Image: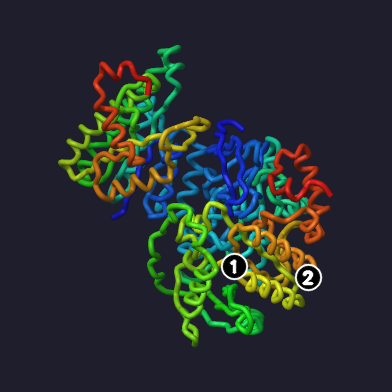
Amino acid sequence: MEQTWIILGASSTMARALMQKLAEAGAGLVLAGRRMDDLQASASDALARGAALAEPVAFDARDPDSFQPVIDRALDQPGQINCAVFVGSMPPQAEIDADPGLLDGVIADSFTGPARFLQMLAPHLEARGSGTVVGVGSVAGDRGRIGNYVYGGAKGGFATYLSGLRNRLGRSGVHVLTVKPGPVDTAMTQGMEGLPFPTTAEAVAEDILAGVGRGRDVLYTRRIWWPIMLVIRAIPEHLFKKMSI
Amino acid sequence: MQGARRITYSGWGRVHRATGPVARPHAADAIDGTAPAFGNRRSYGDAPLNDGGGACDMTAQNRILAFDPRAGVLTAEAGVTLGTLARVLPARGWLPPVLPGTGFATLGGAVAMDVHGKNHHAAGSFCQHVTALTLVQNGQRRPVTPETDPALWAATCGGLGQTGVITQVTLQLAACPGDVMVVTERRVADWAEHIARLDASDAAYCVGWIDATASGAALGRGILEEAEVGRGLPPARPAPRRVPLDAPHWALSAPIVRAFNSLYYHRVPATGRTTVRPFDGFFFPLDRIHDWNKLYGRRGFHQFQCVVPPEQAEALRAMLAEIADSGLASPLAVLKRMGPGRAGYLSFPMGGYTLAVDFPNRAAARALIARLEDLTVAAGGRIYLAKDALATGDRVKAMYPDHPRWLSRVAAADPDGALETDMVRRLDLRRT
């Protein structure tokens, strides 16, 4: 069946890796993001690799007025509609601590923006009776840590939202995959030293496609993060509050 | 450069190492041309290294920016691999005109080394099919074509990245009238037959595998592989495997290599055979085994590759005899005929024959390679800088008569030496 993927945050490094694989498999792509010149370059890349369609559309997670045109563009296509969400922002926690006004943007980029978008898209997926939603969260969303608890809070909220969306859409044959990457070598992590168990955008994209193929619900990548987060989640709060991990 | 991380890295041979801040820019405008660039570091020696200084990892620059399926012209970022192009283009009727032995080589690296393929005798070198480049020189983006600045062009093609960071490459593709490679393999009994068959071949792609452990009457025996693009169903290729850790030093010892080579030789029937292979299986046979360089263990390995003029085939035979007598060779030994095609002052190819042999990194192998380099100079040939980790500046300058012209153009393009690499310093290439 023909597949069209909406890619929210198509300028992200992980999104690019996934789009290149989808394009080589002949899927159609709606590239949604803010940097149109960059999206145009990625669209050219996707078409050269064999994408059935590659169309950049302006999208800003903080501007709900930009959402409907993205959905409309995908609905023009026959067949199955899928959506992969890569939007998010992670300013250093210290900057947010100094300027609490930054918090709203982080929540909008990482949680409420994409959640509202998916809320608008959901009825269309239900109507077509098929489709896949891939939501990229983060291991940071599994526990609030002193180092980045606003970003973690947003990603945690998004993961909980995806859990509920899975519960809803599963009844209509639509699959929701939550992806929780550890540190990935992306534009967002440039120059950060000493990141534990780092992975690459290409490896994350392979894991996502494997997870979609197998109908996985929640996927940690690299896989080592599943047992690690199992332990971290199990630490009692009265101990955790004194830790700086 | 911004966003750099301090790492230790090496070339494919894993003999030389470098430590320094390496940036992997995701945005093209973050590349400022103030540090040398590398791709997937498939050069064997120290060409991609800058010990103590910074470097720019180009592998995140991996987009095809424009593709004209009618004219077969493609512009891509320098980090796109040739394997990617060989994978996605045949379905659209095109193929990269020149493919080296690994698909992990990037476009930028292919230009900086002016690489060649199994079709060099007919198709020439990689850069002969490149029609435009974008360089970044000290923060300035600079488009270059062979017409706008012929000297800069010739200093850039095969120029070891010293004229600026190569960020974009425009390539004229070759028409690809099929879906598979039709490969004919024949046993060749000795050196004379090997050379005669290479000379007689009119196949588009032609390469000889040599059993570098065979000596005496069997010296030069091997398998001649001739191939053309054909129509048909590509056979499925097994999933890639990975060498998980460094092999022990005896893994490629003389008895094991002799046994392997004998099996490899006799696997092809005495009457020869024709088979069909997928493109990647034909062009990049070793890419199926990821990290195969670990088979040589922690000490790493060297590849010696030289080319000698056609009338010096006898000198090449003498080199092979020394290699066979040394008992140091590995299974990987390749003999090819080369045409005259080359694009730059420091391009490797020249009309004649090229021999490439891998050796584990041992004192005896290093001494043998030094001796082979001397024989190469005496034969009027040259060694391939993409493979070199051992040569001296005097030897290399004697092999590359256009070095002074390269040097004068490089001095103008990078006056402060910001793009110097460990290889450039080892070979003293930035001085006469």
Sequence-wise first label, 1 or 2: 1
Pick whichever, A49 or B328, lies toward us. Answer: B328
Pick whichever, B368 or B192, lies toward us. Answer: B368
Q: Which of the numbered marks, if any, corresponds to residue A183? A: none
Q: Residue at x 73, y 78 (%)?
A: B314
Going by the numbered disc 1, the residue's amino acid type is: Ala
Q: Residue at x 40, y 21 (%)?
A: A147
- Above/below status of B160 relative to B285: above
Nearer the observer, disc 1 or disc 2?
1
Graded by Cα atoms within 10 Å as few (under 14), some (14 to 19) or many (20 or more), the crowding at tag 2 reads some
- Above/below status of B260 relative to B26: below
Residue B354 position, x and y percent, is: 67, 69
- Above/below status of B177 relative to A127: below
| Helix, strand or loop under label 2 | loop
Residue A170 position, x and y percent, is: 18, 41
Graded by Cα atoms within 10 Å as few (under 14), some (14 to 19) or many (20 or more), the crowding at tag 1 reads many
What chain is tagged by disc 1?
A: B
Q: Which residue is mark 2?
A: B379
Q: Which of the numbered marks, if any, corresponds to residue B329? A: 1
